[in-house]
Amino acid sequence: MDEPSAAARTEVHASPEVVYALVSDPPRMAELTEELARVSWLDGAREAAVGVRFRGHNRIAWRRWSTTATVTDAEPGRRFAFEVSSVAGIPVSRWQYDIEQTGKGCRVEESTWDRRPVWFLPFANLVTGVRDRAEHNRHNIERTLSRLKAAAEAAHG
């Protein structure tokens, strides 16, 4: 796989299992992220597993749009990832959380890969209002990881 278009990591004083429980719960992650406002499970799903789909309802200021995500990796305590497409099925991105045990808890890396076709960029930029998606995502990932760290450490006790 190519290099991510944006990524960051943080040390969390909580077990990999606690962190995984958070990142693999998209409705809960909507509370910790910048753009994702809420999540609806699709096809009767109630929890994440490989192949499960969910709809992401996103927002930036007054702009709103939805995407469909399909879980591709669900390895408890290690990795959670999903591919995102527009509601029309156009590839948008891949999001991945890698979790590694450390002496005091774990290290979490959040990464994203921009999968949008070149012809789709002007439309996507207009809908989201974001021209530099890589920089925008870097900033959002840092904020998400900070909130994730706080939530995991609070849950860990």
Image (cartoon, rainbow, N blue to C red):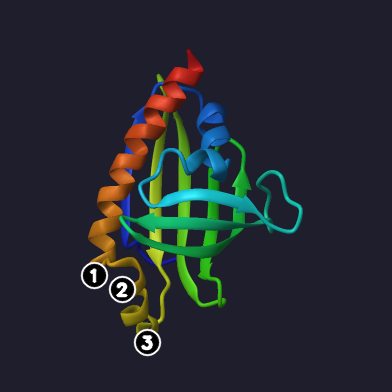
Residue that lies at the very extreme toward the right in this rendered image = 44
Residue that lies at the very extreme toward the front in this rendered image = 62
Q: As shown in the figure, which amino acid type bears the numbered disc 1?
A: Arg
Position of residue 133 measured from the top left corner of the image (x, y, whole percent):
28, 65
In the rendered view, would you say 134 is above or below 35?
A: below
Q: Quadrant of residue 151?
A: top left
Mark 2 or 3 closer to N-term?
3
* Residue density around tag 1, few if under 14, some if 14–19, many if 20 or more, within 10 Å: few
Q: As shown in the figure, which amino acid type bears the numbered disc 2?
A: Asn
Give the numbered dot on residue 119. 3
Q: How far apart are marks 2 and 1 (CA)?
A: 6 Å
Question: What residue is shown at x 27% (from left), y 66% (from top)?
Answer: 130
Position of residue 118 measured from the top left corner of the image (x, y, whole percent):
35, 83
Q: As shown in the figure, which amino acid type bears the numbered disc 3?
A: Trp
Position of residue 149 measured from the top left corner of the image (x, y, whole percent):
38, 29
Give the numbered dot on residue 90. none
Q: Do the residues labelled 2 and 3 touch (CB within 8 Å)?
A: no
Mark 3 or 1 closer to N-term?
3
Question: What residue is shown at x 38% (from left), y 52% (from top)?
Answer: 35
Check disc 1 and report the residue beneath it: 131
Q: Is label 1 in a helix, a strand or a loop?
A: loop
Q: Is label 2 in a helix, a strand or a loop?
A: helix
* Residue density around tag 2, few if under 14, some if 14–19, many if 20 or more, within 10 Å: few
Mark 2 or 1 closer to N-term?
2
Left or right of 79, for residue 126: left
Check disc 2 and report the residue beneath it: 125
The quadrant of the picture occupied by the N terminus is: bottom left
Question: What residue is shown at x 69% (from left), y 59% (from top)?
Answer: 51
* Residue density around tag 3, few if under 14, some if 14–19, many if 20 or more, within 10 Å: few
